[in-house]
Image (cartoon, rainbow, N blue to C red):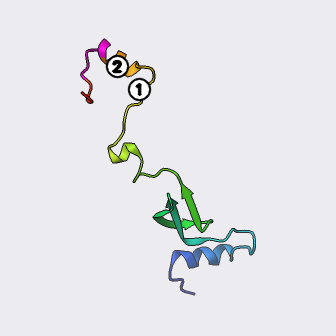
Amino acid sequence: MVLDNLYEIHIFKIGTMKKEIHPKWYAQANVLCNGETVLTLGSTKSELNIDVWSGNHPFYTGSQKIVDAEGRVEKFNRKYKIKSNQD
């Protein structure tokens, strides 16, 4: 008996998978962010809804802003004599 690939060898050794114990597999599951498809991948759900991904995260887009809580950033900048970028 000649087996062509590793999958056939694996199935030959262990037999077939048990039926009705595995979730349904969607090979083309859509990942949605704000109603827009941003990625397609394999999943046990047909559709995945996410809030943040690398395409809209401030760290990756370069639009990251420092949130100033009660003037702490300004106090730090004055203490260490750092010029702010927003001037």
Based on the picture, tell me whether residue 84 belongs to the magenta stretch. no
- The kind of residue on which mark 1 rests is Asp
Residue 44, located in which quarter of the rendered image?
bottom right
* Residue position for label 2: 74
Q: Please report the residue visible at 49 percent of the width from the left and 58 percent of the height from the top.
A: 33
Where residue 16 appears, as percent x and y from the top left, is 68, 77
> Of the residues shown, which amino acid type is indicated by label 2?
Glu
Residue occupied by mark 1: 68
Q: Could you tell whether 1 is left or right of 55 in the image?
A: right
Please say if the residues under marks 1 and 2 sit with CB atoms less than 8 Å apart: yes
Q: Residue at x 42, y 47 (%)?
A: 57
Kind of element beneath mark 1:
loop
Q: Earlier in the sequence, mark 1 or mark 2?
A: 1
Q: Judge the density around disc 2: few (<14), some (14-19), many (≥20) Cα neighbours within 10 Å.
A: some
| 86 left or right, relative to 48 | left
Question: Which stretch did the figure color magenta?
Answer: 78-83
Magenta stretch, overall SS: loop
Q: Nearer the viewer, residue 33 or 17?
A: 33
Q: CA distance from mark 1 to mark 2?
A: 8 Å
Taking depth in this image into account, of 65 and 25 the one nearest to the observer is 65
Identify the residue at image location x=27%, y=30%: 86
Which numbered marker is on residue 47? Answer: none
Q: Percent x, y for residue 31?
A: 51, 62
Q: Position of residue 23 (x, y in %)?
A: 69, 68
Residue visible at 45% across and 20% down in the picture = 70
